Image: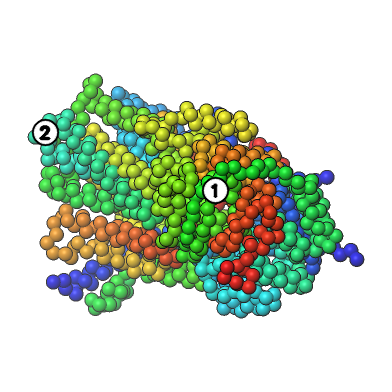
Amino acid sequence: MITFVQISQLLQSAIVFGTVIMFGALGEILTQKSGNLNLGVPGIMYLGGIAGLAAAYAYEMNTANPIGFVSLIISFVAAFAASALGGLIYSFLTITLRANQNVTGLTLTIFGAGLANLFGGMLNAMAGGVGQISIRTTSSAYRLSISNVVSLGPFASIFLSYGFMAYLAIVIAVGLFFFLGKSRTGLNLRAVGENPGTADAAGINVTRYKYVATCVGAGISGLGGLYYTMDYIKGTWTTDSTIEALGWLAVALVIFATWRPLNAIWGAYLFGVLYWLYLYIPGLTRSSQEIFKMLPYVVTIVVLLRVSMRKKREDQPPASLGLSYFREER
Amino acid sequence: MSHIKSGHEPLIRIAKRDAIAKPKAIMIRAIAVLLSLVVSGVFIFAITGLNPIRVYEVMVEGAFGTSRRSWVTIRDTMMLFCIAIGLAPAYKMKFWNIGAEGQVLIGGICTAGLMRALGSSMPTPLLLVVMACASLLGGCLWGIIPAIFKAEWHTNETLFTLMMNYVAIQLTSYCVSLWENPFGSNSVGIINQQTQGGWFPKIFGQAVSLNVIIVLTLAIGMHIYLTYSKQGYEIAVVGDSVNTARYAGINVKAVTIRTMAVSGAICGLAGFIAVAGASHTISTSTAGGQGFTAIIVAWLAQFNSAIMGLIALLLVSLQKGAIQIASQFKLNNYASNVITGIILFFILGSEFFINFRLILRGKKGGEEK
Amino acid sequence: MEQTPAVELRHVTKRFGKVVANDHVNLTIRRGEILSLLGENGSGKTTLMNMLAGIYFPDEGEILINGTPVTIASPKDAFDNGIGMIHQHFKLVDVFTAAENVTLGTDDAKLDLRQVADHINEICQKYGFVIDPMKKVYDMSVSEKQTVEIIKVLYRGADILILDEPTAVLTPQETDRLFDVMRNMKADGKAMIIITHKLHEVMDVSDRVAVLRKGEYIGDVATKDTNPQKLTDMMVGRAVKLNINRPEPVNTTPRLEVRNLTVYDALGVKRLDNVNFTALGGEILGIAGIAGSGQKELLEAVAGLQPMAEGASITYRSIGSEDKGIQLVGMTPMQIKRAGVSLAFVPEDRLGMGLVGTMGMTDNMLLRSYRKGVSPFADRKAPKKLAEDVLKELEVVTPSVSFPVRRLSGGNVQKVLVGREIAQEPSVLMTAYAVRGLDINTSYTIYNLLTEQKMKNVAVIYVGEDLDVLLELADRILVLCGGQVSGIVDARTTTKEEVGLLMTKFQKGGDKTI
């Protein structure tokens, strides 16, 4: 029997896990709504993670008494800016130079993962000792939650035991929902992703919309990497490919959510539950746990199939996703 | 009497090129590679403070400095080349097979499993054939699943094959913990280290000869298949226009599935080569991102076998060189990914100048720049 | 009274590569006036208007709005100058509602769709449209989509409207309604340009006609001072005396018997409604009808490319009516070929359906023959020879037989396609708009080729849009109207008026009974 405490634990770890990929997916939803299929999400999340970490490290090393809140701001801005810069590289190549989107995105993933792990390795080497840096002040600022201040019952802690970024993700999702669905700029952006020729003829600056959506989207995706380094692994760096796996899961979540920001919220937590479920199923061997970790991907495939079979117009990807736009095409 | 009000006329306009002379196209690409090497040099200088020229010398040493290093470079080039060959027919058909990574792993799993099970009981030549067949079938299966759904329901293949990669990765993790050796190491270890059962034999005194033979044979075969065969012709027609293919009586669904079967199978075979011909073990990094890199290789070469080989060689040499820098200057191997990324960015960007031309303000539209 | 023109174009020139689409064109449009821009396909009408709409940028020349020189570098600039263009291919976002499409890209501060809907309803009332502002575009009929397009530019306060072939996709009834709306807008002081090549519409709706020929501006006349004959002369440069050689058919036998053919499209709309006819070997059967009356579906159904409703029968007979025949319904193009039926088909969309754009002539010839033989390799010797023959006989202009056909001009692309299809020695030859976009000489080459095929006892089916050609080329004319056969007439005895009437038979007053 699974106890309430176990459910509570599962939900908490699912929400932490889900928050990482929710950021990645929300940024990618914004990007894809402009018609850009950016497969560089994993690379961008790497960039966000390492930039935040490096900025916080530089601050903590060069300040006698680092203040958590200042460090938080510095690392947050650095992470967003570095990720947006990754988005800018992608935008310049695919929008201005009209390079193939898939290939450019994959290259960005290779590049971002390389850059992040290169610098991560250097930081770890600089830290000396155990070979792993740790930025306690900043990380604890990120992880500060209500449960640190007042003691909560087991039920309340399901909702209130996270750092601010877990709530920020939800705020961004809701904000994105209103932006895409209810605002003029959002309407224009969707038109760009559906039919850039039409948007162009309507006087919308297609290039600018694509650039801004892709760069801001990349910035949001990068926050997933930041949350991962600061909160999930508590202000350290491990040179491995975990972020890459999470990045692809974020791309999967975009499909799972059928490009709707609100679906991404519960979808992210569901992915988290599916990912951690194996810990709570009794009698699993270590190998069969690996099969369980397959679930988020399998579920995404099922959603992808269902969407393509039902052919409901509102569930389809943006119509011009993956195509570059050239006005004088004939 | 003609003039243009140049107040708001865009400073630079772009227009599609009709055609570009070959030498010019090659020159544009060469300039791009050169520029990317300069930028990479600046990057390396920025983080290591080393003379970039010296750094490139070290890189060449790293890739080709000793005969052993050269052979490793060749071995890894063959692996990347092999996957690119597998991807070529799918991409020629405009089927975005992002799933090579998974297809390679499935081929690797089949190979490693058989190698463990039959390594001591079956003679190596026969075992090699059995493993090759199994990996072909495994990769083929992994390739045709998305193809069937694409053919029947237009399911987006980019996203489907991407997901299939991670299913394959988890399947690999499953096998790794199932076959763990020694217990607790979380790895399979070198399979049949003593007997070398199921390993590629040395030919002409070289362990990687067979890799080269298989991949070059595949390269030539694929070139002939795509250029001269009826099936290759069908692939090209479907890739250009599905309607024209239907018009000509081509069964588009069948061609889609058949082509992905070929594509997946060859990627699966790459997994066989990676396990039996190189690492003699299996892990989630057996494909190591090569499935993604190979997409870029195939795309940039526009599916021309010889050019795919050259690009693969360039990328792998760079990686090997960067690894050498890393170990000499105490960085980690990821430096190679950064340099690969920079070079690919430049090559991707240069395609623009091959397909488009720029018209500066004040120039008349018809002029060639 | 000399009023400042709403729009004045001076010496506007646009080139695409080596092709001059517009060569120093001058044009003026006044307020409260409907100007017809007349010209054959490829005469540069749309290109010229696209420069006003900010889609293309002129290479030379100058544009004046209300007497002031302006630069129109983007559609936004066009709107700012009060110019709105209704494109032939609708520029609408399918998953948006009418209201969302209308408000798209406007400067209104807030997105208030209810207010937009109210405004749309006002415009509808003022000019006499009907549309549901909350309906999604993918649920709309063609004429509803066009209405949204027009409302879109009116909503933005455009007072210069450009309509690019607005009637090509409309029924006569819908066309009349559109013209009423246009007259209302004219009364409201708007300047309007309508691109068309239907002369009776020009006479019906416009005040003035400007004519373009091969990118050059020929001149303009007041509609009341001209007639269709004079306009045609301006358009083609000389009077059209087609004089197409039409020998009497000999030894005609039933070749293709089509019975109870009904076709629904992917959205479930009936495209063909119980079509019955027999095409004879040795004659040219012309097919006339307004664009989108089911011509495409009819040809594709015969070619095995179109799913048909239950009960249809298409019987192919090689020699005569005593032959039992082959049932083509349910066969794929491949099976039809294997059954020994040599079917040649020149589809409307040449590069999208008939040819492979990225391949050269040789590989395009291969499309029909690559399966020959048991070898796994394709034989390119015969196709290369064929490509060279077609190149010589039809005078295709191309650098080489391996040069991508996509880069050839429209006429040359058509020659490659027709050349290949005739080389199959077909027993049935179907062509859709075979001379669209071709110059006069090439058109005659095609007419002669088709007639030659007819004399070889081929059943030729010719779908055309130019009634003059149909009347002189075909032996019989089948008229399609809204997916139904509204009549089959003898081309030698019928008149243009009779065919024209049949084309609109079922639409006037919604009379659906035959």
Task: Write down the quadrant of residue C514 in the picture.
Answer: bottom right
Residue furthest out toward the top: B204
Residue on which the image places disc 1? C280
Q: Is residue C340 left or right of residue B127?
A: right
Q: Is residue B356 left or right of residue B330?
A: right
Q: Is residue C193 above or below residue B238?
A: below
**Which chain contains the residue that carries disc 2?**
B
Identity of the amino acid at label 2?
Answer: Met
The answer to whether any part of residue B251 appears in the image is yes
Identity of the amino acid at label 1?
Answer: Leu
Residue drawn at the location 29% of the way across and 40% of the way down: B265
Q: Is residue C10 above or below residue C270?
A: above
Q: Is residue A169 left or right of residue A288?
A: right
Residue on which the image places disc 2? B122
Quarter holding the N terminus of chain B is top right
Query: C494 or C421, which is in the foreground?
Result: C494
Query: A131 or C298, which is in the foreground?
Result: C298
Q: Position of residue A249 (x, y in %)?
A: 33, 57
What number is the disc on residue B214? none
Residue drawn at the location 25% of the way across and 56% of the way down: A294
Q: Is residue B5 left or right of residue C389?
A: right
User: Badge 1: few (under 14), some or many (20 or more) residues near its Cα, within 10 Å?
Assistant: many
The answer to whether any part of residue B189 appears in the image is no
Is disc 2 placed on a helix, strand or loop? Answer: loop
Which of labels 1 and 2 is toward the front?
1
- Same chain letter for marks 1 and 2: no
Instruction: Give the CA separation, mark 1 to mark 2.
Output: 70 Å
Quarter holding the C terminus of chain B is top right
- Asked if marks 1 and 2 touch (Cβ < 8 Å), the reply is no
